[in-house]
Image (cartoon, rainbow, N blue to C red):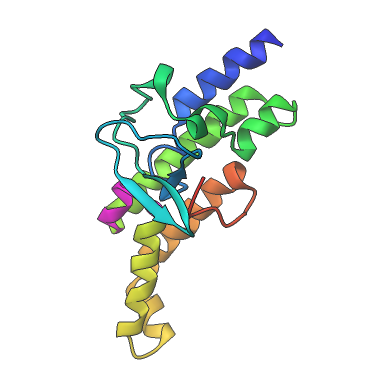
């Protein structure tokens, strides 16, 4: 059991997808919990939280010992699968690598994705309104659409396809 606990911490620190804006736009705060300096308070779906990406995430958590409760207790679907033995640790690390690669590729098409993937995707989709028809939009944006699809596929192990883009 101790090995799984070490893997939990190592996998989470190696990943950071829940912190860096890849999966969510906000992390909810517990009742009465304050935010750390430099965190931006936010409200989504009537839930108080802090905006993501977290300013304390720089390839790893820089406030790991004093991070908010949600950061200490949240576990994505990939972590749960590793804990259950359904996904080997090395395969989980490969999923993390795929997600990082997909995010970097997406950011070349949507620079906003460097901050928040869900927000960048929403802004991109809203751009469809400026086109006369869907076919023209798809033709003009084929590479960006392919990068979004790859990002969505890369996030699936973390969310099992659940729409989790708002709050963790």
Q: Which residues are magenta?
A: 110-117
Prevailing SS of the magenta stretch: helix
Residue 81 in the image: state x and y as whole percent.
69, 33
State the residue in front, 51 or 144.
51
- Residue 16 lies, with reference to residue 120, above or below; the image says above
Residue 56 in the figure: left or right of residue 149: left
Residue 144 in the image: state x and y as whole percent.
36, 63
- Residue 58 lies, with reference to residue 47, above or below; the image says above
Please tell me which residue is depicted at 44% across the width and 61% down the height of the picture: 146
Please tell me which residue is depicted at 55% across the width and 36% down the height of the picture: 95
Residue 6 location, quadrant: top right
Whether residue 154 is visible to the viewer of this picture, yes or no, is yes
Residue 120 location, quadrant: bottom left
Residue 69 in the image: state x and y as whole percent.
50, 30
Whether residue 143 is visible to the viewer of this picture, yes or no, is no
* Residue 114 highlighted magenta (yes or no): yes
Residue 66 in the image: state x and y as whole percent.
40, 20
* Residue 146 highlighted magenta (yes or no): no
- Residue 62 lies, with reference to residue 164, above or below; the image says above
State the residue in front, 84 or 25.
25
Please tell me which residue is depicted at 52% across the width and 27% down the height of the picture: 72
- Residue 90 lies, with reference to residue 55, above or below; the image says above
């Amino acid at each position: 059991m101790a090995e799984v606990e070490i893997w939990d911490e190592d996998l989470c620190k190696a990943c950071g997808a829940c912190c860096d804006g890849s999966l969510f736009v906000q992390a909810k705060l517990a009742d009465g919990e304050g935010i750390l300096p430099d965190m931006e308070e936010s409200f989504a779906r009537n839930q108080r939280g802090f905006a993501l990406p977290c300013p304390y995430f720089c390839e790893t958590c820089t406030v790991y010992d004093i991070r908010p409760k949600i950061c200490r207790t949240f576990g994505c679907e990939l972590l749960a699968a590793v804990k259950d033995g359904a996904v080997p640790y090395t395969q989980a690390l490969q999923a993390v690598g795929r997600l990082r690669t997909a995010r970097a590729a997406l950011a070349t098409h949507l620079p906003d994705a460097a901050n928040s993937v869900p927000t960048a995707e929403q802004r991109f989709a809203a751009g469809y309104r400026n086109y006369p028809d869907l076919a023209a939009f798809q033709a003009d944006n084929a590479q960006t659409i392919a990068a979004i699809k790859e990002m969505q596929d890369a996030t699936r192990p973390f969310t099992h396809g659940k729409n989790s883009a708002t709050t963790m």
